[in-house]
Image (cartoon, grey):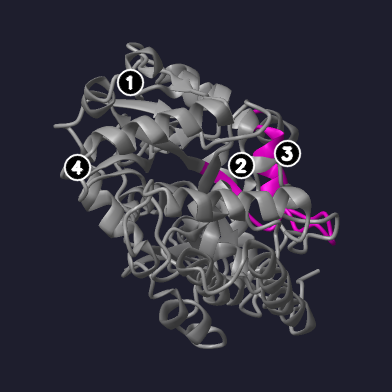
Amino acid sequence: MIKRIIYLLMMLALSCGLLTGCSGNKKKTVEITIKTPDIEMHPKNDPEVKKSADFLEKAARAFEKQYKDFDVKINVESFPLNEDTEYITDCFGTPEAADILFARYLNMSNYIYTGRVVPLDDIVNDDIKQDIEESNWDISKVRVSGMTYMIPYYSLQNILSYNKEIFQQAGLEEYISNEDIIQNWTLEEWDYILSKLREYLPETSYPMMMYAKNDEGDTHTMTVIRSQGSHFFDENGLFALTTVEGISGLQWIKDNYDKGYYPKNCDSMELTDMMNMFANGQLAICTINNSIIDNFPEIDMGYVNFPDKDEEGIVTSYLTGFEVFDNDSEERIQVSKDFISFIYENHEWMEYSSAGIPVCSKIKDKYKDDIFMIEEFYKNNKNNVDFTANNPNWRGVRNVFFYHIQNLITGDSSPWKVAAALDADCNAMIKEGWEYSTLHK
């Protein structure tokens, strides 16, 4: 009888060691939420993925299966574009708060200064760091702390496209490239090209884009202001346009408008209007990035950098990547960081960055024959400028910037006065941002 009892106890102990239902060996459950705006995403390695949420769902399920530290559950939530406030900041401190955000830096960078975004330097190992260009890491850091708050995944590079047919008809054959390259023109060539296009085009068509109705695409206008050599910011990251170069950049915009190079009344037009005009053949030169080139299949396009006094060209990039939020749970932070490490340390999940220009050179090399002009875009990274200078309250900056461009175009303010007003108002927004900012340590 005693032997039978001992045997039963041994079997029970063995069962508890094998069955997850026994409390002694059951892992703690940790639940996290990944949020992402509704971003179109078409990676070359997986045709099933159409949206950013599709990619994250697949990665989340794979991570859950192999994770050892906790019994983890990952919720992936997609939200409409431009509704970040409702789905991110309004959810701070609630059960609906995001633990991870996968989005474009333009919006993500704003959250760093809430004190909720966790530095990620501890998961950026040497292999990850060395495989991604330093310029991408610079944009991922906060200047005052030097800490990394975002991790880049892929980018969209903003350049200019031109309609080759219009150029030919305007007698500008010598400026057309028959190769898929990104060209550069001198400022003198820009002036000549725009004047020839104006001579050829009918009154209702225009040589080049310009718009100032709202903050949509204001990055491109900021880039044009740099055309005469302005660095745009000073060493502290503040607007510094009251310089010879800054005022000259604004003057160039005003002169171009007065010469009819930009659409009439473009102060009341937006980027979408420019895209529509370009598609309809009413605009010869318009901004584009690598993700929307295929949106204009009917146009034979050439590509050129934004104008630059140094003749090297200027571009900007919209980086897309990850950041982690602190929701008062070290376990949720750990799982979130481990998920991101899982992505970057596994070639399989880095391949999904082929949806844009991969920041990882290994992925770029693998898909160099599948991603249009990938080598050109990679070479062009050296001309990339940081258009926010990692400043807080960039939303506030954008809310005031376009009003001054309206005044420039209409002639209500001179280029000098516009430069002074931009420095005053935009720097006031930046300083207000710093005043109310908190960085997570």
Q: Earlier in the sequence, mark 4 or mark 2?
A: 4
Q: Which residue is mark 1?
A: 370
Q: Which residue is mark 2?
A: 227
In the image, 265 versus 146, the foreground residue is: 265
Name which residue lies at 26% across and 58% down: 273
Name which residue lies at 19% across and 31% down: 299
Is 375 inside the magenta-drawn segment? no
Mark toward the viewer: 2 or 3:
2
Is 151 inside the magenta-drawn segment? yes
The answer to whether the residue labelled 2 contacts the one labelled 3, judged by CB atoms less than 8 Å apart, is no
From the viewer's perspective, tell me whether residue 144 is left or right of residue 394. Answer: right
Inter-mark Cα distance, 4 to 3:
57 Å
Depicted 188 relative to depicted 37: above or below: above
Inter-mark Cα distance, 4 to 2:
27 Å
Name the kind of residue labelled 4 in the image: Pro
Q: Earlier in the sequence, mark 1 or mark 4?
A: 4
Q: Secondary structure at mark 3?
A: loop
Depicted 229 relative to depicted 139: above or below: above
Q: Which residues make up the magenta segment?
A: 131-153
Q: Which mark is residue 202?
A: 4
The answer to whether the residue labelled 4 contacts the one labelled 2, judged by CB atoms less than 8 Å apart, is no
Q: Earlier in the sequence, mark 4 or mark 3?
A: 3
From the viewer's perspective, tell me whether residue 238 is left or right of residue 132. Answer: right
Mark toward the viewer: 4 or 2:
4
Label 3 Cα neighbours within 10 Å, binned few <14 / some 14-19 / many ≥20: few
Q: Earlier in the sequence, mark 1 or mark 2?
A: 2
Label 2 Cα neighbours within 10 Å, binned few <14 / some 14-19 / many ≥20: many
Q: Position of residue 297 (x, y in %)?
A: 17, 32
Q: Earlier in the sequence, mark 1 or mark 3?
A: 3
Q: Which mark is residue 125?
A: 3
Q: Quadrant of residue 82?
A: bottom left
Name the kind of residue labelled 2 in the image: Ser
